[in-house]
Amino acid sequence: MNYDDLMQKAMEASKNSYSPYSKFAVGACVMADDGSTFTGCNFENSSFGMTICAERNAIGSAIAAGKRIIKAVAIYSPNQDNCVPCGACRQVMHEFCKNDNDVDIVLKNGDELKVYTLAQLFPESFSM
Ligand code: THU
């Protein structure tokens, strides 16, 4: 699968990041099982704990559009190569897939894309 377009959308979304406190911008683009895509960026708050990550923002948009299964998530930060998703976002990704092996997490490492599965980044995940 070629994830160039997905990463391009994540990069575009990072430009809308609201991150005045950390100054760490993140953009994400989720692809649902029907191929539709949804972007998000992080948005912070002066009450720091209310910050929402880019990945969860993008997944929230997918959910609001009626999607329930995600197939891939591209993540980009201009501040850091290989910007991996935080633990909370990994748990949220896990909620919206059939199998952690079926979710590709796409990171940008210089000019290259690096692809992991959710299973690789989030082993022994919790479900009910
Ligand atoms: N952030 C994300 O958007 N996604 C992650 O997976 C890691 C962290 C954001 C949250 C906060 O606004 C900033 O990056 C620094 O932690």
Image: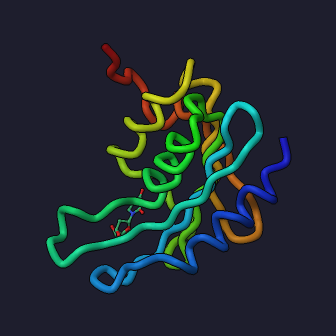
- Indicate which quadrant contains ligand 1: bottom left
Residue 84 pos. (x, y %)? 49, 54
Residue under the point 76% across and 69% down: 111
Q: Is residue 117 above or below residue 87?
A: above
Q: Residue at x 74, y 66 (%)?
A: 8
In x, y percent, where is residue 9?
A: 70, 64
- Residue 123 lies, with reference to residue 89, above or below; the image says above
- Which residue reaches farthest front? 65
Quadrant for residue 23, please give it. Answer: bottom left
Q: Quadrant of residue 57?
A: bottom left
- Which quadrant of the figure contains the N terminus? top right
Q: Where the C terminus falls, by quadrant?
A: top left
Relative to 6, residue 63 above or below = above
Image x and y of residue 6, in percent: 73, 56
Residue 31 position in % (x across, y down): 68, 43
Pick the front one: 110 or 27 = 27
- Work out which residue is located at the far right of the displayed protein and give it: 2
What residue appears at the point 55 percent right and 66 percent down from the top-left corner? 27
Does residue 119 appear left or right of residue 34 in this picture? left
Residue furthest top in the image: 128
Question: Is residue 10 toward the left or the right of residue 121 in the image?
Answer: right
Q: How many marks?
A: 0
Q: By what rule are the colours in the image chosen? A: rainbow
